[in-house]
């Protein structure tokens, strides 16, 4: 039995729902998580270069805390700038993902037999959440670090994330016996 075109499981309604969910993911979740991912990448690169080994533990903790606060402020800014996608935006996006005109999707609401619609992949709008393009700075520093320093021990990178513990002992306790 074919579901009616008014059912939430009708192909058009399903396509509109999942397209809206994808757009919310792109506008809310990805931009608000990216500052924390960037912070982790920058800390790992600083650990790779051994920059935290030169700092006292208090300064190391202060740098990590300030980085966390800046990341949290950036994430909150992204959440506050969130705007729910309108029906027109969702309809247009679904039409583009399926190679149709938006008017055709509006007409499909009245058809009994609706074709299966595909939902496009999420587009990572990272540029809005990284206006200074720090992701490229971190990536370049990581590549240069690998080229100049060669492979560094994992404990050296891990020590950047754990200022109060000895990463060698931490990793030794995690190893299988």
Image: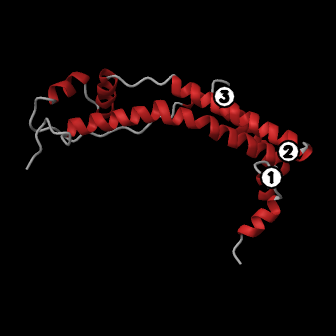
Is the Cβ of the residue at disc 3 closer than 8 Å to that at disc 2? Answer: no
Residue at 29 percent across and 31 percent down: it is 99
Label 3 crowd (10 A; few <14 / some 14-19 / many >=20): few
Is the Cβ of the residue at disc 1 closer than 8 Å to that at disc 2? Answer: yes
State how far apart marks 3 and 2 are (Cα). 23 Å
State how far apart marks 1 and 2 are (Cα). 8 Å
Looking at the rendering, which quadrant does residue 134 occupy? Answer: top right
Which residue is denoted by mark 2 in the rendering?
52
Residue at 20 percent across and 39 percent down: it is 8
Q: Earlier in the sequence, mark 1 or mark 2?
A: 2
**For the view shown, which residue lies furthest in the bottom direction?**
177
| Number of dots carrying numbers | 3
Q: Earlier in the sequence, mark 3 or mark 2?
A: 2
SS at mark 1 in the image? loop
Q: Position of residue 151 (x, y in %)?
A: 79, 55
Q: Nearer the viewer, residue 168 or 104?
A: 168
| Residue 133 numbered tag | 3
Q: Quadrant of the C terminus?
A: bottom right
Which residue is denoted by mark 1 in the rendering?
159
Looking at the rendering, which quadrant does residue 166 occupy? Answer: bottom right
């Amino acid at each position: 039995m074919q579901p009616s075109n008014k059912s939430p499981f009708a192909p058009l309604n399903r396509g509109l729902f999942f397209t809206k969910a994808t757009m919310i993911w792109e506008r809310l979740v990805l931009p608000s998580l990216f500052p924390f991912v960037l912070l982790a990448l920058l800390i790992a690169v600083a650990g790779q270069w051994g920059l935290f080994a030169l700092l006292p533990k208090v300064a190391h903790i202060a740098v990590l805390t300030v980085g966390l606060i800046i990341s949290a402020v950036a994430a909150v800014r992204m959440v506050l700038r969130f705007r729910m996608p309108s029906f027109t935006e969702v309809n247009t996006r679904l039409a583009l993902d399926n190679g149709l005109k938006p008017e055709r999707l509006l007409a499909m609401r009245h058809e009994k037999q609706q074709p299966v619609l595909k939902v496009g992949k999420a587009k990572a709008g990272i540029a809005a959440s990284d206006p200074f393009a720090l992701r490229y700075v971190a990536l370049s520093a990581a590549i240069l670090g690998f080229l100049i320093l060669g492979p560094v021990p994992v404990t050296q990178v891990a020590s950047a994330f754990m200022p109060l513990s000895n990463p060698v002992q931490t990793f030794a306790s995690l190893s299988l016996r």
